[in-house]
Amino acid sequence: MEGRQGDGVSGARVGRWPRYGAGLFLLSLLGCAGQQEPDSMARARELMAGAQGTSGDVVLRCEPDDAEVYLDGVLQGACSDYAGNPRGLTLGTGLHQIEVKKQGYWPYTTYYEPSGARARLTIQLRSSESAPGGSTP
């Protein structure tokens, strides 16, 4: 009759679960304590701890100045809107994609992570009408 639920006998199933659960929990803790995390994880933790979460802005000087500016794929306006007077393109924390496009020109794409300081980016779009080498098709 030993092992039936509800009969009050020592060692019944109901009485065993808490002991096994606690033992498994302690074993898992001891097992994790003995393992060392990979160097890449340790380095990632260091970088995350040291991250300031900086933001910033970028002043754009473009030719042609009416080219469209995209930040992370979202249209922000014309390049002349971000020439620094009165403002630059405001960036939040993290890595951002900046694209400058205009019909008839090759697009320009770059990636920028702000450092808290104002940066200046000068872009001269090349016409897509002419073929490489200066001759037209």
Image (tube, helix red, strand yellow):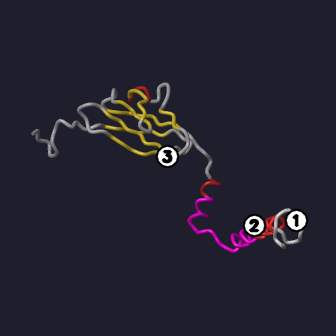
Disc 3 residue type (three-letter): Leu
Secondary element type, mark 2 = helix
For the N terminus, the quadrant is: bottom right
Secondary element type, mark 1 = loop
Would residue 35 be counted in the magenta stretch? yes
Would residue 32 be counted in the magenta stretch? yes
From the viewer's perspective, is 1 left or right of 108?
Answer: right
Disc 3 vs disc 2: which is toward the camera? Answer: 2
Instruction: Looking at the image, tell me whether mark 1 or mark 3 is earlier in sequence order.
Output: 1
Q: Nearer the viewer, residue 32 or 53?
A: 32
Name the residue tied to disc 2: 25
Would you place residue 50 above or below residue 65 in this image?
below
Question: Mostly what secondary structure, the magenta segment?
Answer: helix
Spatial separation of the CA atoms under disc 1 and disc 3: 64 Å
For the C terminus, the quadrant is: top left
Q: Position of residue 22 (x, y in %)?
A: 79, 66
Instruction: Looking at the image, tell me whether mark 3 or mark 2 is earlier in sequence order.
Output: 2
The quarter of the picture where residue 3 lies is: bottom right
Name the residue tied to disc 3: 95
Disc 2 vs disc 1: which is toward the camera? Answer: 1
From the viewer's perspective, is 107 left or right of 128?
Answer: right
Name the residue tied to disc 1: 7
Disc 2 residue type (three-letter): Phe
